[in-house]
Image (cartoon, helix red, strand yellow):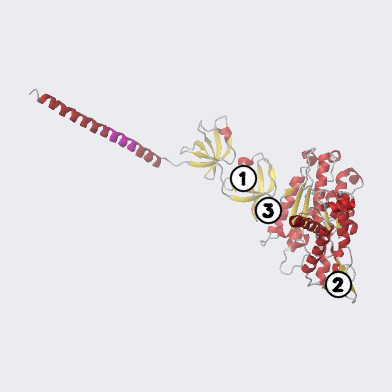
Amino acid sequence: MALEEPKNYAALEAELASLREKNERLSTSLLSARKRIQDLGDQLDSLSKPPAYFGTFLAGHSADHSIDVLTGGRKMNVAASPYVAIEQLRPGQEVRLNQEMVVVGIGTYENAGQIVQIEMVLDPQRVLVRVHADETRVMRIGGKLVGTDLRVGDTYLADTRSGYILERIERPDVEHLLLEEIPNVSYADIGGLGQQIEEIRDSVELPFQQPDLYREHGLKPPKGILLYGPPGNGKTLIAKAVATSLSRQIAAGQSSAPAQNNTIWQSSAAGQNATPGKAASYFLNIKGPQLLDKYVGETERQIREIFSRARDRASRGIPVIIFFDEMEALFRTRGSGISSDVETTVVPQLLAEIDGVEQLDNVIVIGASNREDMIDPALLRPGRLDVKIRIGRPDREGALDIISKYLTPDLPYAESEIQAHGSAQAAARALGEEIVAELFTCTPEMEYVELTYASGKKETLYLKDFVSGAMLAGIVGRVKKNAIKTLLETGQKGITSAHVRAAVAAEAKENSELDQISDPEEWAKVNGRTRGERIIAIRPL
């Protein structure tokens, strides 16, 4: 019996260990089952949880910690949970309500809705918007737009159910037309147009500088200017230089004193909003064909937005130049369209903007065209595009002035040229004179076209009769390229007269090859030769 006790003891120990292991597995299973039951209970609770409501925040009342909300089309005043910070809510923001209509959470803003366009800012809380072509509504300003400057003509995202505009939406089809730039082109950068620059400064800058004298003489500044003439002669550069000049005058404070009481160019409020000592002017460069749209009314809408943006900028005392390039493409004579009558509504829209009841203070309309004969006469009458300045082709002196803007003394000239003329500056002028001499010769190599008039008389025109600022800039570019090629091929550095002669010859050859003339009358209009006897035939030489 004494020998069996240890054996029984060992068996009991093994059985105990087995039971302990089973107990641990059972405990683990029970804990897992309990957790699973709890998870299922939570899921059951969430599934049986009553629905939450969403509303739009209108106003908060800190006295009783209540909130005015719009939910389900009804305006209600509801209680807010103590955990909801009313002061952080903004009009138009979403809030979450429980079944008892208590605000228990804060949401975001609606990010989808109707696109609307502002037509009028009524007060700091409300705006008049156009929803559709035939529908306008008064809506409230909400979200991050509260306290910001809203511009008439801009497009916004609106929640039409709650009546809030919430976010500004960029319209690529319009924004690319309204690129506002502050040009850095001065009158000194323009060559060969001294008389035209003086005319445009008298028309634009003199009223800005001397408003009291204009008021004393009962004289109003022009509303618009037309720059016309053959292509490539600096019409766009002049318009940019006007904007730059006005900007620099404001920055220098030259016109700050008269601007305080200036009722000709700007209102007193606009003068107060201008930033003293800060250069500011805007140049809206509008390409005529860019405005054309196949949908009825779209072109007119874009014109309205352009002038709306300009008025917005000008109301702050900032001069705004609206520059219409290729003006004949958009504002051609009404009734002259062959396949379209778009001009019958586009031209009146521009006339309405220029003559409209809203005063165009600080807004200057400048048009450019090389086919002024195609522009509607109503635009060209006094009171609209008052000043008409012809930007003609440069003469010898003007051509040399233009070349001097591109062929500058700081360029690398050949040592032989510097030694021959004494300095880099003298070499630059001599090479410029050589370009002019080559271009303005009347040799057979420079013959361009032969004109035949209705009387039978014939006239030979040379390349000099078609010189433009763009052509001169291109010739100087060829000179520089020739110098680079010579350096790469032979190692000889510097611009020489040989490069000049080669550049002029290449330009003459290229122009003669590209000149394809099918309609003498149209050619004469484009090249500014409509005065005098009628041309019936043109033969390229």
Please say if 443 is above or below 161: below
Tell me which corner region of the image, top left, top right, bottom left or bottom right, holds residue 375: bottom right
Q: Is residue 32 magenta?
A: yes
> In the visual, does 174 lie left or right of 233?
left
Q: Residues within 10 Å of mark 3 (few under 14, many from 20)?
A: some
Tell me if mark 1 has few (under 14), some (14-19) or many (20+) residues whose alpha carbon lies within 10 angstroms of its own.
many
Relative vertical location of residue 528 with respect to residue 312 in this rendering, above or below = below
- Name the outermost residue toward the top: 2
Q: CA distance from mark 3 to mark 2?
A: 46 Å
- Provide the secondary structure element on which disc 1 rests: strand
The residue that mark 2 highlights is 450
Q: Seen from this angle, which residue lies furthest left?
A: 1
Between 346 and 511, the one lying in front of the other is 511
In magenta stretch: residue 339: no
Residue occupying the point 67% across, 62% down: 294
Q: N-terminal of the two: label 1 or label 3?
A: 1
Badge 3 element = helix
Quadrant of res 460: bottom right
Magenta-tinted stretch: 26-37
Q: Give the farthest residue toward the right.
A: 217
